[in-house]
Structures are given as structure tokens and as C-alpha cells.
Image: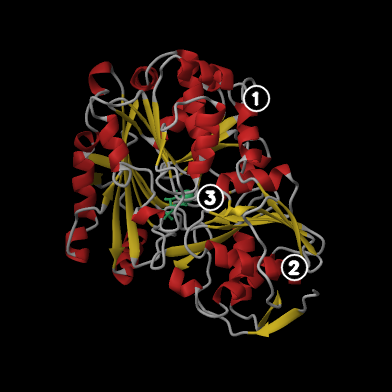
Amino acid sequence: MSRRILEIDTTPFGDQKPGTSGLRKKVTVFQQPHYLENFVQSIFASIGDTGGKTLVLGGDGRFHNRTAIQTILRMAAANGFARVVVGRDGLLSTPAASCVIRARGAFGGIILSASHNPAGRNGDFGIKYNISNGGPAPESVTEAMYAHSRTLRSYRILDEGPEIDLSQEGEAHLGPMTVEVINPVTDYADLMDTLFDMDAIRRLLAGGFTICFDAMHAITGPYARTILEDRLGAPEGSVINAIPLEDFGGGHPDPNLTYAKDLADLMFSPDAPDFGAASDGDGDRNMILGRDMFVTPSDSLAIILANSAHLPGYRGRVRGVARSMPTSMAADRVAEAMGLNSFETPTGWKFFGTLLDADLATFCGEESFGTGSDHVREKDGLWAVLAWLNILAARRESVSQIVQEHWMRYGRTYYTRHDYEELDSARAQELMDELRGTSLVGTEFAGRPVVLHDDFSYTDPVDGSVSHGQGIRIITDNDARLVVRLSGTGTSGATLRLYMERHERGPSNLFNNAQTVLGEMIYSARTLLRLRERFGTDTPTVIT
Ligand code: G1P
Ligand code: ZN
């Protein structure tokens, strides 16, 4: 049956501005007539000639994934793509999508995800575009999408017909376009085999080292089962909550101590396995735990860098590390000791792309439970888990021993992030404006003189692009730091994030509680920002 290309009239929506990680809105917003189609057309209009190209397509499996994929397939065919590579059942984790784009030389990929945001009929949905290097579209491209979305008058789509069956691997045709349904795990799992000492991990697990990976009913279940249980031989049941559900089981798959509480409780109980980890909705975040030990993401990045000689895929070729500005400075200290590059970038994985492409950085990470390397152009949850298992297998020490030995050598960067969610947007903006309008240099913060107070700006050393307004930094003379910024991923009200850190050396200063050590900074930040007065509360919603 031949399918006609339709040009459908539409009117612009004013709110299709991509945030830190694509366009995220409530499912009900995406369900409005033409809403998804308008944005997809804006993507296709902003990425150059789509004729004859290959597109990768998949998502985290949340509610609306299946419907959106069928629409996007019809639009891709009408916009001239020759081939779309889709994960079976419409599934692809974010790092796997990045891997597939690279492995198959695709023009780019569309990933359907709102990361860890709650899913289901009343939850969130999201869509993001990744370019041919496998990484998130740069700001110039996302701005073009937004500009286009505000003026477009029509979109192109194939008329309706039978849906493509995504449950079977293989090829199908949609008008002149080929749809190739692939196993969503295989390319990714094969890539992991090339990076890590899988035999050493297999021996570690065979020797009785116990692990628990919590997939939180989101996308990483099938990936973790294939890699950890089938390929590496961890006993069945080592992966828990392994079945991806459209509503993520009603949970909030954000791997941190608040939302992965069951796992955290287990790891601090007498029944704790040797190693615990979790990933998020779309598989790009990770949390690493040992018995009675939580590894902060900032420390995890520093420790992976310090131990990179144990990782076969990186041995002898590590150039440097990049971290987002609010991430602790722990990795910088390792890079300096190893004589490697270190970079401080704005929040968001997209800023790492140019550094990785230019081979200036090899590892990168964010305090928000994101860690990764140049193997793909996204952060990668299971990659971090495998990096840790590789290090544990090589060193034959516990997670705690490895972390403590790291602190002894480099000092410990005490770190915490306090989030205040669903705040009044106007008041939150006012707070940021006030902070921008004054300078605290010369005054005291938490009993120490302030030596730097700025709004972080970044000039990309590779392409020269400049990003302003990336967050307030207040640094005191002991290198302690308060960072204040507003979230770019929230979907209701404003989310204020406060990040605090302080570096300590000497055995007697290394093993204290972070909230206690940072207590004075926390108190001073709340007072300085007048949180109670502005928002009626100064108790954070989430502490990590
Ligand atoms: C948050 C994190 C940031 C991460 C982003 C996408 O963004 O803080 O590090 O890159 O999610 O996962 P934010 O809401 O702070 O803008
Ligand atoms: Zn995510």
C-alpha cells in the first residue's frame, strides 16, 4: 500500500524551548493535537538535510513512548530519512542510543525520555535530539529548534496506516523508508566488553563477591540482566526491579539516597552485599555504594580517574577529566597529581562533547550522579558500575577501603547538594537577580573571607562558544565553595539548587559526617539567601 505524504497545517506553541536535556513536559501536554508533531518538525528543520540519512530512535519505555514512536516514524519517512534504527519495543537507554548512533554512523537520534521524572499517564514525557557524534545537540541547534517551533505553520507526515510491529527484530518498510528493529542491548553490551576486564569481573563474581543492582523498574533492567547476570555470571536476582514499566512502578527512578532508599537501607544493613548500584529512568545516571559506604558521584569520578590504569580500554590513553562546575573539585586534584588536563564546564552533558571529540578529556562527570567517558557522548550508568567492578576485581579491596585510601592520598572533598523544589518561579528568579547584582568579595561567608563571587561563564576551548549565567559561585579563602543555580530540567515551578563543598586533609579530618562538617556553610547559605523569608521554608526537599 502506498502511503501519501501529508502537509498538515498547525499553529505554533510558545513553550517548546528545550532545557538542560531536551523538551520535557507533562504527558498531557504532549498529548495535545500537533504538540509532538510540531516539535519533531522543528527538530528536522534544524539539523540540516535529512534526505537519505539514518536516524536512531528509542526511549526509556515510559507511558506515551509507543504512541510517540509510531508518529515519529511516519514523520521521519515524510521528511526523507532513508532508514530509522529502532530498539525493539521502542526501547533504548540514553547511553545505548548514543552508542548505536556512533556504531552505525547514523546522522543522529531521537531519544524519548524525561530521565528520572515520574512517568505514567499523569507523569512527564520528553524528547531530545543527539547529533552524529552520539552527543546531545549543542545549544546552537536547540535554539534553532525553539526558533522554528515559534513560527512553523505545517509539518510533514505519512498518512495513517498499519503500525510498524516493533516487537520483532528485523526490517520493515514505511513508504520509501526502511525501519530496522534491533536488539536494544547488543551493540551496547559489545562495547562494554571492549572497555573493561570482563574476565577479572567474572572471576570476582564467581568467587562469591555479591552485588545488588536496582534498575528501579526503568530502562536498565534488560541491560543489567544481560551484562551482569548473563555475560558476567552474577547470580540471578542480582538485578532487582528489572522489568521496565510504563509508570516505573509508580516510583521516581533517580538513583540517590532519597529515591533509591530501599537499596541504600540494604547497603547499610547487616545483610548488605559487597557492592550496590542503581540507575535512573533512561539509564544514564548511577549511584555507587559499598557495604556501609555511599560514594559521592564527585568522588566516584575522581576514583575512577585515579584507578584508570586498571581499565584495559583506557590504559595509556587517558588525557584528562572534565566536570561540571557544581561538581566537587576532587577530580581536579587527581588530574593535577597525574599531570592530566582538567576542565570545568557548565551543567549539562552537552558541554563535554567538544572536549571528548578533541581528545582533550577522557572521563567526565557531574555531581548529579552522572559519570562517563569518551566511549559514547552521554553519561552512562552501567558503564560506571562496570568501571567500579573492574577496579574492585583488580584491587581485591572493598569499596570502603578504596574510598578511604583515596581520601588519605588526595584529601577528602566534603560535599552536599540541597534542592528546594516547586518554588515560586518569580521569587526564585528574584533571588538569582539579587545575587548577580551584588558582590560579596571582602565580606565573610561561614566565617571565612569571600575571595570570589561571580556568575559562571564558560568559553568552550574547542569551538569558542560562550555560555553565560551558569550559576553563582561564592568561594572563600580556604577553597570552600557555595554554588547557587536554578534547575533547567524541572517541569513545575522553580527548583533551587545549593551546592556546598570543603576540602580537608589529615587522617583525623577524613571520616566525619558531611552534613556536620558542612553545617556552618549550610546555615550561612540559608541566611544569606533569606530562604525562609522568601519561600516560607528553608528545609530542602532533597539532600544528596
Ligand atoms: C540536572 C542536573 C545536571 C544534569 C541534568 C540532566 O539538571 O543537575 O547535572 O546534566 O539534570 O540529567 P538541572 O535540573 O540541575 O538543570
Ligand atoms: Zn537520566
- Nearest the eye: 130 or 59: 59
Q: Could you say whether the residue bearing mark 2 is in a helix, strand or loop?
A: helix
Q: Could you say whether the residue bearing mark 3 is in a helix, strand or loop?
A: strand
Q: Which residue is denoted by mark 1 in the rendering?
A: 317
The answer to whether residue 301 is seen in the rendering is yes
Amino acid type of the residue that numbered disc 1 sits on in the rendered structure: Arg
Total numbered badges shown on the rendered structure: 3
- From the viewer's perspective, tell me whether residue 257 is left or right of residue 197: left
- Nearest the eye: 117 or 308: 117
Question: The C terminus is located in which quarter?
Answer: top left
The answer to whether residue 343 is seen in the rendering is no
Q: Could you say whether the residue bearing mark 1 is in a helix, strand or loop?
A: loop
- Mark toward the start of the polypeptide (3 vs 1): 1
Q: Which residue is denoted by mark 3 in the rendering?
A: 458
* Mark 2 Cα-neighbour bin, 10 Å: few <14, some 14–19, many ≥20: many
Amino acid type of the residue that numbered disc 2 sits on in the rendered structure: Ala
Label 3 vs label 1, nearer the camera? 1
Label 1 vs label 2, nearer the camera? 2
Q: Tell me the CA gap for discs 2 and 3.
A: 39 Å
* Mark 3 Cα-neighbour bin, 10 Å: few <14, some 14–19, many ≥20: some
User: Residue 155: percent from the left, percent from the top?
Assistant: 68, 78
Question: The N terminus is located in which quarter?
Answer: bottom right
- Mark toward the start of the polypeptide (1 vs 2): 2
